[in-house]
Image (tube, rainbow, N blue to C red):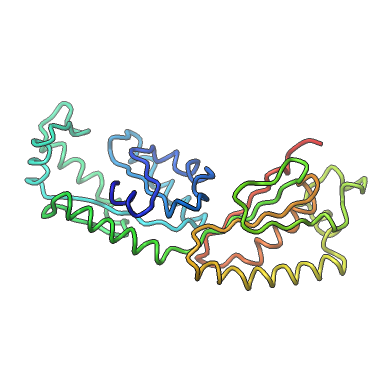
């Protein structure tokens, strides 16, 4: 963890696996001073083995870019380390230490098989291991794709923080003033048709998305880790939702981490 923190990562130790998706929703990941996130997990968390496969699959389906580093060591080395540190093994509370170590190895074998990197720490002292982890962290940052977040919002509810590109679409025709559309939102097909099916919206979409297609590779080349694109209208329920969805569909690519949030879509007006 010290090596990862030195590389600019925000680190959390012993986070329950089932809380990881919620943790990734926190705005901390868009902090410009944080290069990446690192979470340490092991058998200290009793539900780890039963929950991590589902969590990992869920994150992959959402296009999160991450690596699994698996650290191991020989039995004799582990026995010596436990003797020196006088720490208790989580699986050896009522059995010999060696039995706990062997049980842990067997239980974690599937995770080891899915790891991006397996590091045998047997021959490393703490300083050598820290150097190796630091180099891996810096290398990962150099190849990590920029994460894009598209968010729709209503100006009447305040602008979202930490926004890189903000677009005001209040110049578009407002479905709020159409009686049969007022109670719907921008995900409804009738609202989409009303907002997009005119020459002004068509020209705007073409020009703005052309600008984004020009800018995004430049931000990626510059090494930016996160890019937030905010689209605002008056209430955040109609026009901004429609345009944000259109932008999301236009810029998503295989392997590009991208998410979309409609911040104010459910606020009652």
- Residue at point 39%, 41% (across, down): 17
Tell which of 249 and 173 is nearer to you: 173
Residue occupying the far top of the picture: 94
Tell which of 188 and 4 is nearer to you: 4
Q: Residue 97 falls in which quadrant of the image? A: top left
In the rendered image, which quarter contains the C terminus? top right
- Residue at point 13%, 29% (across, down): 95
Residue 69 in picture, x, y percent from top left: 30, 54
Left or right of residue 261, residue 193 in this image = right
Residue 12 in picture, x, y percent from top left: 37, 41
Tell which of 106 and 75 is nearer to you: 75
Q: Is residue 229 above or below residue 40?
A: below
Left or right of residue 152, residue 52 in this image = left
Residue 159 in picture, x, y percent from top left: 70, 46
Tell which of 245 and 57 is nearer to you: 245
Left or right of residue 11, residue 89 in this image = left
Left or right of residue 77, residue 16 in this image = right
Residue 238 in picture, x, y percent from top left: 79, 50
């Amino acid at each position: 963890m010290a090596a990862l923190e030195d590389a600019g990562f925000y680190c959390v130790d012993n986070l329950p696996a089932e809380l990881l998706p919620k943790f990734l929703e926190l705005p901390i990941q868009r902090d410009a001073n944080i290069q990446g996130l690192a979470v340490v997990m092991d058998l200290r968390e009793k539900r780890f083995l039963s929950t991590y496969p589902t969590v990992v699959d869920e994150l992959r389906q959402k296009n999160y870019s991450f690596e699994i580093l698996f650290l191991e060591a020989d039995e004799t080395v582990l026995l010596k380390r436990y003797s020196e540190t006088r720490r208790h093994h989580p699986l050896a509370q009522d059995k010999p230490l060696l039995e706990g170590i062997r049980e842990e190895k067997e239980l974690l074998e599937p995770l080891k098989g899915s790891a991006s990197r397996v590091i045998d720490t047997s021959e490393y002292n703490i300083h050598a291991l820290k150097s190796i982890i630091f180099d891996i962290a810096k290398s990962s940052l150099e190849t990590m794709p920029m994460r894009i977040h598209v968010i729709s919002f209503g100006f009447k509810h305040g602008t979202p923080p930490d926004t890189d590109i903000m677009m005001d679409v209040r110049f578009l025709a407002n479905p709020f003033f159409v009686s049969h559309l007022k109670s719907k939102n921008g995900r409804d097909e009738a609202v989409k048709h009303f907002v997009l099916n005119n020459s002004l919206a068509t020209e705007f979409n073409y020009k703005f998305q052309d600008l984004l297609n020009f800018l995004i590779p430049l931000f990626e080349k510059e090494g930016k880790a996160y890019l937030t694109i905010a689209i605002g209208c008056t209430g955040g329920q109609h026009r901004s939702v429609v345009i944000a969805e259109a932008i999301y569909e236009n810029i998503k690519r295989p392997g590009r981490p991208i998410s979309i949030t409609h911040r104010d879509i459910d606020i009652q007006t």
